[in-house]
Image: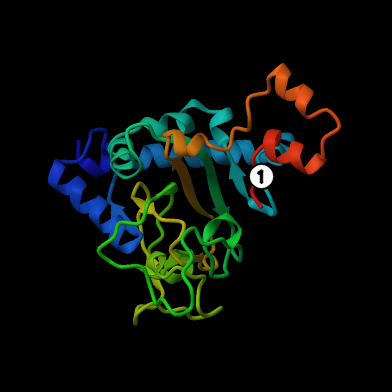
């Protein structure tokens, strides 16, 4: 059976893995071909459609304002969950955010013709993790900027032409310390938008701080792209758990300013 038929199930050779990880840190994106088999992609698309066709589940799994994004389908299908420990995905992720990596999200973007998140942005509501002042042009390329979380994108359909709605990126722009510098045609150090072409089963490691967008799907078929999101699992990632809710603290906070209570005991919020 060929690699294309059965997909990959083991870690990449050390030299190949190192090349993928180095490319990810430098460019903000790195592609690995033929990780999932065609049969796996067919099954995951089928289950995505089945979940979407259930009105209650579709609403429960809706991702914010985007009706074509299905969030956390792993709650209803083990095959979605098991992708988080699939090789070579897991070992590559651990090479970037550490052995104690943790789940921080999953979704399937199911773009029908005309649909896309088509504006240039960085993720987390367009917030820059490592901003720079105007008089500092970029982060030093010799520095590997820390990655708090990132995505592994899995193409579940072929995305091989501009009409298929590929992800478009500006490589290296995560080093800019800024939001995209143009709403239509952003460039960073002479590099403009590049499409990420994939066949079903290919994956790409994706830094959410790189300038990117989804090109509108102009084909006559639905585009399926899965995202597995991983975060650092060290104690830095757990610093937003709030103060220990002890009886002593409860007494101290009786009648306190609600803002203080929110800061000390409120759940983390994406703002």
Element type at mark 1: loop
Find residue 31 and report its horizontal and vertical position in percent.
30, 55
Does residue 254 show up? yes
Does residue 57 show up? no
For this orientation, the residue located farthest to the right is: 255
For this orientation, the residue located farthest to the top is: 247
> Which residue is at 39% across, 37% downward?
40
From the image, tell me which residue sits under label 1. Answer: 269
Residue 102 position (above or below residue 62): above
Considering depth in this image, is 223 or 207 the residue closer to the camera? 207
> Which residue is at 32% across, 45% downward?
96
Residue 235 position (above or below residue 191): above
Which coloring applies here?
Answer: rainbow
> Which residue is at 48% across, 38% downward?
237
Find residue 192 and report its horizontal and vertical position in percent.
39, 78
> Which residue is at 20% across, 46% downward?
17
Res 107 → quadrant:
top right
Res 14 → quadrant:
top left
Is residue 218 shown left or right of residue 61? left
Is residue 15 shown left or right of residue 97? left
């Amino acid at each position: 059976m060929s690699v294309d038929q059965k997909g990959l199930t083991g870690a990449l050779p050390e030299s190949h893995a190192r090349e993928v990880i180095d490319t990810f840190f430098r460019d903000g994106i790195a592609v690995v071909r033929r990780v999932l088999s065609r049969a796996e992609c067919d099954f995951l698309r089928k289950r995505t459609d089945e979940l979407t066709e259930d009105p209650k589940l579709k609403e429960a799994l809706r991702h914010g304002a985007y009706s074509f994004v299905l969030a956390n389908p792993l709650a209803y299908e083990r095959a979605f969950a098991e992708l988080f420990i699939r090789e070579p995905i897991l070992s590559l992720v651990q090479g970037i955010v550490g052995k104690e990596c943790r789940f921080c999200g999953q979704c399937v973007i199911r773009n029908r013709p005309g649909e896309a998140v088509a504006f240039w942005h960085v993720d987390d509501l367009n917030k820059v993790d490592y901003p720079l002042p105007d008089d500092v042009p970029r982060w030093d390329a010799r520095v590997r900027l820390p990655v708090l979380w990132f995505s592994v994108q899995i193409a579940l359909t072929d995305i091989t032409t501009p009409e298929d709605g590929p992800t478009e990126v500006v490589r290296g722009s995560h080093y800019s310390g800024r939001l995209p510098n143009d709403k239509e045609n952003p460039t960073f150090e002479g590099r403009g938008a590049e499409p990420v072409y994939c066949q079903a089963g290919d994956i790409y490691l994706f830094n959410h701080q790189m300038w990117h967008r989804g090109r509108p799907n102009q084909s006559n078929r639905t585009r399926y792209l899965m995202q597995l999101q991983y975060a650092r699992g060290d104690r830095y990632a757990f610093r937003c758990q709030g103060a220990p809710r002890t009886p002593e603290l409860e007494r101290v906070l009786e009648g306190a300013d609600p803002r203080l209570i929110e800061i000390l005991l409120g759940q983390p919020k994406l703002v």
